[in-house]
Image (tube, rainbow, N blue to C red):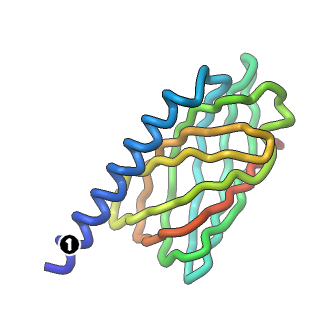
Amino acid sequence: MRFSSAVAAAALAVSFGVTSAAQAADAMGAPTAKLTLTAKSADIGVGYTWGEGKLTYGGKTHTFSITGGTIAAVGFSKIEGTGTVYNLHRLKDFDGTYAAAHGEATLGQGLGGAVLENRNGVRIKIETISQGARLAGSAQGLTFTLK
């Protein structure tokens, strides 16, 4: 019985995250770039995330690294995501730490979504697919650095 309750709670959290991200895109204006990313997260209380991605901006593809952390999480997951970037007017404004309220409940495979924003006002609406066993519910900071 406990397992089914946890699965129902996770499904509700995931559907809320995806719906919120989709609705937020409408209010963010016209897209200025696209990105894809692959990252891994390992957590025991405090978590660490690392990976890489590709940003398509101005007709060119740029690679970037991902590092960051989560305040309260347990487990391990591999994350693949696609995103739409808004308010990116100069390539150098992409670099920085992006903050987001984050929630993840993955057991096997899960779906997620978030809206990230850095200090330069660049916003990213991202949708993710994760694999592994991880439970996280906290503020998250991810630093994207162009290579």
Q: Position of residue 138 (x, y in %)?
A: 54, 68
Q: Disc 1 on helix, strand or loop?
A: helix
Of residues 57 and 119, which is closer to you in this image? 119
Kindly indicate the quadrant of the structure image that contains residue 48: bottom right
Residue 84 position (above or below residue 98): above
Q: Which residue is at 79% across, 49% downward? A: 96
Q: State the residue at coordinates (44%, 63%).
A: 104
The kind of residue tagged 1 is: Ser
Question: Which residue corresponds to mark 1?
Answer: 5
- Residue drawn at x 51%, y 54% is 79
Rendered view: 63 above or below 128:
above
Identified at 79% across, 25% down, the residue is: 89
**x, y percentage for residue 102?**
52, 60
> Quadrant location of residue 110?
bottom left
Vertical position of residue 74 compared to residue 112: above or below: below
Tag 1: Cα neighbours inside 10 Å, few (<14), some, or many (≥20)? few
Q: In this view, does 25 lie above or below 29?
A: below
Q: Position of residue 3 (x, y in %)?
A: 21, 76
Instruction: From the viewer's side, name the closer residue of 47 and 9.
Output: 9
